[in-house]
Image (cartoon, coloured by chain):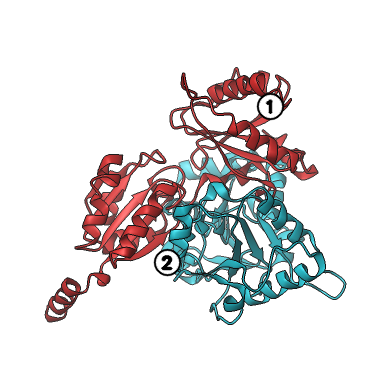
Chain colours: A cyan, B red
Amino acid sequence: MGGKFTYGILKFYNPCLFMLYLIGLGINDEKDISLKGIDAIKSCDAVFAELYTCPIHADLSNLEKLTSKKIQLLNRKQVEEDELVLKSAKSCDTAFLVGGDALSATTHTEIILDAKKAGIDVKVIHASSIFTAIAETGLMLYKFGKTVSLPIPQENYFPTTPYTNIKDNLDSNLHTLLLLDIGMSANKAIDVLLELEGKMNGKLFSDSSKLVVVAHLGGDSLIKYDAISNLKKMDFGIQPHALIIPSALHFHEEEFLELF
Amino acid sequence: MGGKFTYGILKFYNPCLFMLYLIGLGINDEKDISLKGIDAIKSCDAVFAELYTCPIHADLSNLEKLTSKKIQLLNRKQVEEDELVLKSAKSCDTAFLVGGDALSATTHTEIILDAKKAGIDVKVIHASSIFTAIAETGLMLYKFGKTVSLPIPQENYFPTTPYTNIKDNLDSNLHTLLLLDIGMSANKAIDVLLELEGKMNGKLFSDSSKLVVVAHLGGDSLIKYDAISNLKKMDFGIQPHALIIPSALHFHEEEFLELF
């Protein structure tokens, strides 16, 4: 008791003694967190989570049972405007759980930056992510270029940068991982690509172009490699979905993809 | 008992009922494996591991205690020539543990391919990896181009492709993750880059060029952002080390890197 009390006093006068853990939940559900992540949660006084940057299928109540900690699910406003995580880390050891790897969503680097400026010690605990899980397709991670995001087009917002970025990768003989806006199906993404083709005329996509669709990787991973005309008709089940635009394939990559 | 016996008979006649789990151990030590990975090990009759493609600091005896399974550590010959993992998966549920994410080392796609051809069901269980952990530097994953490997130069083998690949990324305003040969320090890698500069004269590297060194990420992560002339004199401790060659930095990236 005495030791714990002294430590409490020390912490009170030296905010640097508090820890903020930024913990990746991993790619698919709450069982993709690491043992290290579980240990960190158990060591904390406050535990928060967000599932808006990377909405995985995590049942947080299972993690609560496993760690005997209450987990408070936050929305974007609570994280970014109200700064609940940062405020908590100023007064007690705090864990913040996020889908995918801890920093795949660049927005959370802000929290680290602000925490470090406030003298809070930060530790990142990593987990699995779509960025590497795509190796399940047999495509080599070394042959991927820049990752490209595809937003859902709006009436006054239909950016062509995804198309030019894919073209740059293809020109360099590199595959492209195409991450889709939250809520966007692979089928919708294919429509958008074809519409971009119509605007840009770069001859990247036609009905016979072969793409890779990946869905719920790390769960019951679904991978399909086929021509756009066939992919358009398929149902890939629950999201998230992502697309890969393959460049010229290595013999081994081709052999592997043909399995799907 | 009867049910289990029937299942055994079924398995004997239908090899497709056996499972091969390819399980990522994660980025740094044995506590970076996921809960899903632990469950899979517990469900298997045979468990193998290799630490030659990605030599993390995993104490496998801790995983043995946690799962009550014996883990057999294999060398490259036992995996690739003797095919011990594949042979095992033909007769019982088998787990194969590898450092980093399960397929960061492209070589293991071969095992999946061979297993599927043999009618064995394969499941990949993902984990953390250097490919995404580099976001700890504050650099955005979306701004990375092709990942480049830097081999230790030999008397008759001093490839210049790493240099041209870095140049291609820089020309496209993309960062480069430079993965080093096993056993190669960041200091040695910097020497190799300067030697390549002497050969290639592309004006990518001089003593004042600022690079990022990352060491034992996911453990007590060490990140240094400094000029080559300073980095050359530093000791980055235990390996693995990796380098990042940053392209033009976003304001937020610069602010974050200055912390290191």
Placement of A133 over or under B57, stated as above or below: below
Q: Is residue B256 visible?
A: yes
* Quarter placement of the C terminus of chain A: bottom left
- Percent x, y for residue B243? 59, 33
Label 2 resides on the chain identified as: A
Q: Residue at x 53, y 41 (%)?
A: A7
Q: Residue at x 52, y 58 (%)?
A: A134
- Percent x, y for residue B4? 16, 76
Q: Report the number of discs.
A: 2
In this rendered view, identify the residue nearer to me: B24 or A195: A195
In this rendered view, identify the residue nearer to me: A242 or B187: A242
CA–CA distance in space, label 2 to label 1: 46 Å
Q: Residue at x 21, y 74 (%)?
A: B14
In the image, is B40 to the left or to the right of A206? left
Would you say the residues marked 2 and 1 are in contact, meaning their CB atoms lie under 8 Å apart?
no
In this rendered view, identify the residue nearer to me: B253 or A180: A180
Q: Residues within 10 Å of mark 2 (few under 14, many from 20)?
A: some
In this rendered view, identify the residue nearer to me: A11 or A58: A58
Q: Is residue A125 visible?
A: no
- Quadrant of the image occupied by residue B113: bottom left
* Residue type indicated by callout 2: Leu
Q: Which residue is mark 1?
A: B226
Placement of B53 over or under B122, stated as above or below: above
Placement of B164 over or under A38, stated as above or below: above
Q: Secondary structure at mark 1?
A: strand
In the rendering, which numbered label is found on residue A259? 2
* Residue type indicated by callout 1: Asp
In the image, is A116 to the left or to the right of B190? right
Label 1 resides on the chain identified as: B
- Percent x, y for residue B50? 32, 44
